[in-house]
Amino acid sequence: MKMSEREQDNRRAADRFAPQIGYTRVVIATELQDAPPTAFEGHAYDISLSGLRFELDEPLETGDKVVIELHLPGLLRSIRTTAHVVRILDEDGEAGPRRMAATFHAFESPVDATRLTTHLGSGYFGPER
């Protein structure tokens, strides 16, 4: 039996929080073999301690290694982490924005991990809509 998108998304081990869509900027930099680094700007749909669901105008590939710069409302500095794209949620073949999911692997510094944990636990964001 095939799982719905919501059931697939709910397999995460960490609680997710939903920022106001369109107001949580993300910059995703790719590090592909034999190609110069490329950065794409988009926005977050939901955030957890273990990953992120986001939208970009350019689709990435499942398995791509990326560096994420997360600009959370209420924080003065961005949070940086490395991640892998684990799912492409919109695969209709038409041009336009694509929603994707990535799993975090390592934060740039322990301070970034602490800042994300603190911010998500502060009540600033509501639970996932």
Image (tube, rainbow, N blue to C red):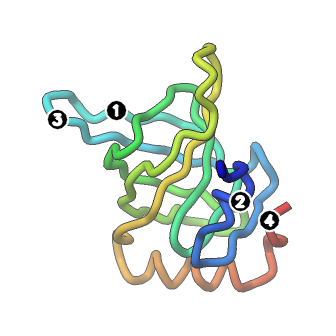
Q: Secondary structure at mark 2?
A: helix
Q: Position of residue 21 (x, y in %)?
A: 78, 48
Identity of the amino acid at label 4? Glu
Q: Are marks 1 and 3 in contact (CB under 8 Å)?
A: no
Q: Quadrant of residue 29?
A: top left
Q: Secondary structure at mark 3?
A: loop
State the separation of the CA atoms marked 4 and 2.
13 Å
Q: Which residue is identified by label 4? A: 128
- The mark that comes first in sequence, 3 or 2, is 2
Q: Position of residue 15 (x, y in %)?
A: 68, 77
Q: Which residue is identified by label 3? A: 33
Q: Are marks 4 and 2 in contact (CB under 8 Å)?
A: no
State the separation of the CA atoms marked 3 and 2.
33 Å
The residue at the far left in this view is 34
Q: Closer to us: mark 1 or mark 2?
A: 2
Q: Is residue 7 above or below residue 75?
A: above
97 left or right, relative to 30: right
Q: Quadrant of residue 92?
A: top right
Q: Nearer the viewer, residue 51 or 111?
A: 51
Identity of the amino acid at label 3? Gln
Q: Secondary structure at mark 4?
A: loop
Q: Closer to us: mark 4 or mark 2?
A: 2
Say the numbered circle drawn on residue 97.
none
Q: Are marks 3 and 2 in contact (CB under 8 Å)?
A: no
36 left or right, relative to 22: left
> Dot 4: few (<14), some (14–19), or many (≥20) neighbours within 10 Å?
few
Identity of the amino acid at label 2? Glu
Q: Position of residue 86 (x, y in %)?
A: 45, 51
Say the numbered circle drawn on residue 7.
2
Q: Secondary structure at mark 1?
A: strand
